[in-house]
Amino acid sequence: MKKKLGTLAAVGAVALLAAGCGEAPEAATGAGSGSATSGASDVKACMVSDAGGFDDQSFNQSGKEGLDAAVAELGIQEQTTQSSSEADFAPNIAALVQQNCNLVVSVGFLLADATGSAADANPDTQFALIDSTVEPARSNVKPLLFDTAQAAYLAGYVAAGTSKTGTVATYGGIQIPSVTIFMDGFADGVAKYNQDNGASVKLLGWDKASQTGSFTGNFDDIGAGQNTTQNFIQQGADIVLPVAGPVGNGTLAAAKAANAAGGDVKVVWVDSDGYNTVAEEDRPLILTSVVKEIGASVQDAVKSEVDGTFSSEPYVGTLENGGVSLAPFHDNDATVPQAVKDAVTQLQQDVIDGTITVQSQSTP
């Protein structure tokens, strides 16, 4: 049931997630229409966002889309609530449990502690947690994890092979495993390009060896993302990977301003295919995206609750199972050299075959 937003090359392109915040949870029932249907299941699947909200064009939005798809497919009930800050996590989860949700999906690493506590207090409720595990593991919590280093490795290779200035960059929102795993893979991809081609493309914003780099400190300060990106551009970067949810919109703004002044800056998006989620006018800025099939993993978790097969065994998305991928190049297909496309196609297969192992301290 896993759906691939990105697949391998075709026609020359590599294709590779109310009480607490003062609002009641939004509810819908059956087929995603908001009204009951005669064949609707008694199962209620629910979701709580992190502070980015469900319109973040990133992992919260992807999770919500997966939940909506499950509702449409299975005719179940749906309920959601958005968090404005970390203080909302625990009360929002509690509110959903009180609304008789059978499965509560928490979106993001930062909700791990609140989810674990809620699971302890409500052993008859099932939980799924995107981008993290709970420690210790609980029998009623299913982690939905993604080895995004694999796809980010391909993106790093593409960025290094496409850069005209010989400098690329990345930064994160908060230094947590679900963020740095992208940055690790991206760094290794740049290094691989340099190794294969005798090149010296520079990476700004992340040192994998020391695990130090640039972070805005949150996932909602778009201005910080814009300032960080402007600094990278001033240092010569022409391709930037923001791993920061909505903060990435600041990178788009900085790239747009630089290009209006005669530059040629591109952006590598994360979590979803940015070409399909950003404003239409910003699409030409998107070189490619490191995609996590969050929606498909949520849909599968909901289905397992409906059919009685739910388990706490972690789901791990990889290049092999289609859980992570490199998105098509879309408008920038002609920008990426054919030799780079060919190399990335082979690299992807090498990762799948195990010939190449992409390593990160945060690999699930």
Image (cartoon, grey):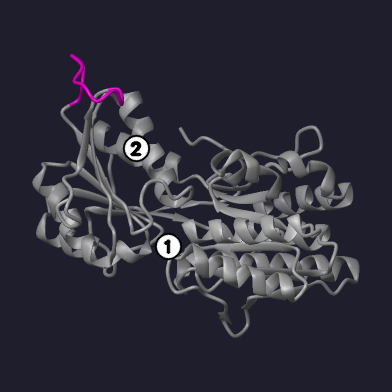
Mark 1 and mark 2: span between their CA atoms?
A: 23 Å
Give the foreground label among 1 and 2. Answer: 1
Residue 11 screen position, x and y as percent: 80, 32
Placement of 5 over or under 247, stated as above or below? above
Q: Quadrant of residue 241?
A: bottom right
Placement of 77 over or under 151, stated as above or below? above
Q: Residue at x 17, y 57 (%)?
A: 20
Q: Which residues are magenta?
A: 31-41
**Residue 359 visible in rendering:** no
Task: Please name the residue that numbered disc 1 is placed on.
Answer: 220
At label 1, the amino acid type is Asp
Q: Residue at x 44, y 74 (%)?
A: 217
Residue closest to the far bottom: 210
Instruction: First in sequence, mark 1 or 2: give its number.
Output: 2
Query: Residue 39 lies in magenta, yes or no?
Result: yes
Name the mark on residue 252.
Answer: none
Q: Decide if residue 3 is on the left or right side of residue 13.
A: left
Q: Residue at x 61, y 57 (%)?
A: 253
Query: Residue 90 lies in magenta, yes or no?
Result: no
At label 2, the amino acid type is Leu
Q: Using the image as rendered, state which of residue 165 and residue 271 is in the foreground.
A: 165
Q: Quadrant of residue 213?
A: bottom right
**Residue 32 visible in rendering:** yes
Magenta stretch: helix, strand or loop mostly: loop
Task: Please name the residue that numbered disc 2 is placed on.
Answer: 67
Residue 301 screen position, x and y as percent: 33, 41
Residue 358 screen position, x and y as percent: 64, 65
Dot 1 surroundings within 10 Å: few (below 14), some, or many (20 or more)?
many
Residue 63 screen position, x and y as percent: 39, 45
SS for dot 2: helix
Dot 2 surroundings within 10 Å: few (below 14), some, or many (20 or more)?
many
